[in-house]
Image (cartoon, rainbow, N blue to C red):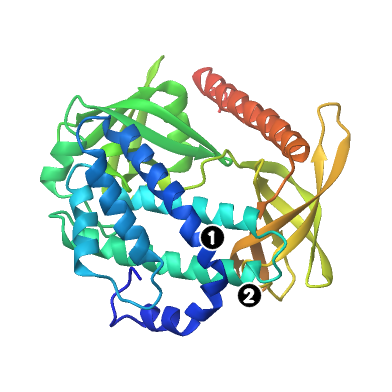
Amino acid sequence: MILPKDSDAYETVLKEQEGLEPLRPFIESYKEVFTAHFIEEIRKEIGSSRIRERFLKENIEEFYGSLFDFKTPARKSVTERFLQIKNRGIAPLLLLQKLLSSFILRLVSDYSDDRELFSYIKLLSAYFDDVLEYMKALLQVDTERDFATKVALKQDELEKWLADGKSVRLLNVYKGIPVVYDAIARRSAKGSVVLQMPYEKGLLAEREGRVVCFDRRMEPFAIEMKIERIAYDKKMAVIEVRSPAWIDSIAQRRKRVRVALGTPLKARITALGRQFNVDVINLSGKGVCLQTDVGYGLPLYEQVEVTLPVPQEDGSVRNIVMRGTLQYISTLGSSQRRYHIFLHANPKKEEILSAFVARRELALLKEIKSIAGKKRRGET
């Protein structure tokens, strides 16, 4: 397995590996798909000529074999070859995370009728999390830069990623919708970092109190900066930022727009023979975040049924029922919990959700412009 023998996680997988033996045919058949997808993603990153396909294929196949050898600790040759891929200018951790997620989704599809499916998912998800943590630590050891999150950028890193005059990509999130845009990095008279951006984006950043800078070459990390002060003219905003620090990259966050709701919708969860009412905090075509005051939790990776009241364009509400998988739980105080659920929606129901999300996203974008217009006119 891709874990060192002296880790607690290795011992855990070793004890539970018999429970994964029924998946052996699936694991063997998926090897070719995994390898092909890994190579395809690398080609997207660097083009077709910089790394020989034979080199990639041999390395990835060996890695895959070790990943699903649940009895043998990580071999030095495998981890060294993984580092070779990284040293060719690729961010393999991000690609690995994406491919392991695809593995789980394919498993859910192929084993949907297997009563042990959620036991498999629970074991594999915990193992994959440990693999990613181990590989992250391995890649950090091999780099000159300390990529631990919330670590301040050194001066040479500031000059590299936020050089004076450099065009950078920034991210803010407004009520759930990610807003990505370009800005220009500058230096103030006292040497601090200044960002020039369009007026509306400056207002958006001011409301969030921070900006996130990202670049594909930084992956799987990004730079978070807190806003010190901001000034506006008719078209541009100039923001002085402080405390630039490394954080986990936005590329690891959910890919779909998940919109927050102006007023929480009332939904219902059915799970383990129980039903309880919940507030819908945000949702996308494939996921939903629900909040409840109920003082007990549900087990992770449990399949649940969610009844969602989805507002329609004509003002009516349409109730749709979907099954989903509980991905993780976050707590708010002693009693409130938020349930983050991946929905297994059929195409028709996903279309209904996606249409609502699109309308909500458009309304939020108009809201941003309206706020900006009011500020220009001195109304806010």
The residue tagged 1 is 26
* Residue under the point 21% across and 56% down: 81
The answer to whether residue 161 is above or below residue 138 is: above
The answer to whether residue 138 is above or below residue 173 is: below
User: In screen coordinates, is 120 left or right of 220?
Assistant: right
Q: Which amino acid does label 2 sit on?
A: Ser
Q: Place residue 270 in its image quadrant.
A: bottom right
Instruction: Name the disc covering residue 334, or none.
Output: 2
* Residue under the point 47% across and 60% down: 28
Determine crowd level at label 1: few under 14, some 14-19, many 20+ residues with C-alpha closer than 10 A. Answer: some
User: In screen coordinates, is 107 left or right of 66?
Assistant: right
Residue 27, position in %: x, y?
49, 61
* Residue under the point 64% across and 68% down: 118
Q: Marks 1 and 2, Cα distance to the nearest angstrom?
A: 42 Å
Q: Quadrant of the C terminus?
A: top right
Residue 77, position in %: x, y?
19, 64
Residue 33, position in %: x, y?
45, 47
